[in-house]
Amino acid sequence: MTSESMTALTDADITSFIRDGFVRLDRAFSKDTAAEARAILWRATGCDPDDPSTWTRPVVRLGQFAQAPFREAANSPVLHRALDQLVGRGRWLPPGALGTFPVRFPSAESPGDDGWHIDVSFGVETPDFMEWRANVSSRGRALLMLFLFSDIEQNDAPTRIRVGSHLDIARQLAPAGDAGLTLRELAADGFAASSHRPETSAVGEAGTVYLCHPFIVHAAQPHRGKNPRFLAQPPLLPREPFCLDRSDGEYSPVEQAIMQALKGR
C-alpha cells in the first residue's frame, strides 16, 4: 500500500488549511449516497420537490439524521483519512449522525440568519445560544464540517467563508483563557477583526465536504438560484482536548493554526 493511498490531503492542502482555515475535499462521498439522503430530507421538509409552489419558506431547519446514507457520508474512508490528518489519529469521534440541515429554498424573503459568526462549542446548557462559548483551545469542537448533499453553485446560497479569519478569532480568544468568550461577546463588534479578509463560497458538487477550522468566521446568504440547497453543518467532536503545549511536539494542523495565530499577536 502506497503512502498516497493512506492519505486524503496533500502537504499543500494541509498548508492551505493552516493558512486559510479550511480545505475542500471533493468526492468525499458518492452522488448516489447524496441522492438517497436528499430523498429522506425532502420528505422531512414537507415540501414537494416537483412543485415549487410548496417551497414557501426561505429556510427549513431539520435536525439529526442517522439513516444509512447519512452514516455512509459521515464515515467514508477518504473522509476519515482527512480527519486523521487535520485533527490527529485517535483524537476525534466518528460521527454517528449528521445535522443540523438548514435547507435553503429560492426566495425573495430574507432568511433572517445570514450574519457572520463562528460556531461556539460549550456552555450549551444555557437556553440563550448567544451565551454559548468558545475558547482558544476550542473546547468541545475539533472541526466545523460542511457536507454538500446537493450541487451548490454561486447562486444557490453557498456558505460564505472569510478566508484566514480563524487566525483573528484565535487572537481574540487567547486573553480570555480557558473560560473563553460567549457568542455575544465575540459578535459585539460584528466580527470586525476579520472584515478585511477575502471571502469565498462553499460551492461544489454533491459529495463535497468542506473541513473548516473551528474558529472560521462564516455566514449564510439568501438563495438566488433555482435549485434548493441541501447541506449539513455538523461539528466534529474531539475524543480528547486540543493541546497547545505538547511535550512530544506532535501538533495537529488545527493546533498549529492556533499557535501560528498567537505567535503573530
Image: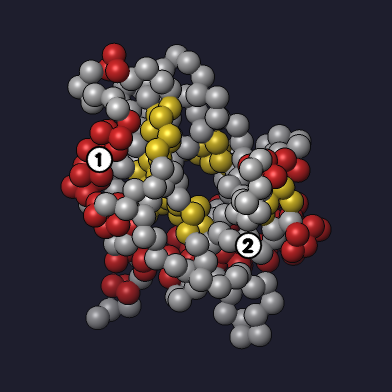
Give the image location of residue 201, x and y in percent. Answer: 47, 38
Residue 108 pos. (x, y %): 45, 14
List x then y, in percent, for residue 196.
68, 38
Front in this rendered view, residue 16 or 76: 76
Which of the numbered marks, if any, corresponds to residue 106?
Answer: none
Residue 15 in sight: no
Picture quarter with the N terminus: bottom left
Q: Which secondary structure lies at badge 1? A: helix
Q: Is residue 101 left or right of residue 149?
A: right
Task: Say which residue appears at 34% left-offset and 57% top-offset.
Answer: 74
Q: Which mark is residue 139?
A: 2
Query: Which residue is at 63% across, 55% downward?
Result: 122
How crowded is the residue under tag 2: few (<14 C-alpha within 10 Å), some, or many (20+)? many
Which one is in front, 100 or 171? Answer: 100
Most foreground residue, 7 or 117 = 117
Along the line of sight, which residue is nearer the eye, 145 or 199? 145
Amino acid type, mark 2? Arg
Q: Relative to 146, is 125 on the left or the right?
A: right
Query: In the shown orientation, is residue 138 left or right of residue 262?
Result: left
Mark 1 Cα within 10 Å, few/some/many (few <14, many 20+)? some
Q: Is residue 10 above or below residue 186?
A: below
Work out whether residue 230 can be spotted. yes
Hey, what amino acid is under mark 1?
Ile
Q: Which residue is mark 1?
A: 40
**Residue at 51% across, 33% down:** 220
Quadrant showing the C terminus = bottom right
| Gap in angstroms between the C-alphas marked 2 and 1 | 32 Å
For image coordinates 81% across by 58% down, the residue present is 175
Q: Residue furthest bottom?
A: 248
Looking at the image, residue 23 lies above or below residue 106: below
For label 2, the SS is loop
The colour scheme applied to this rendered structure is secondary structure
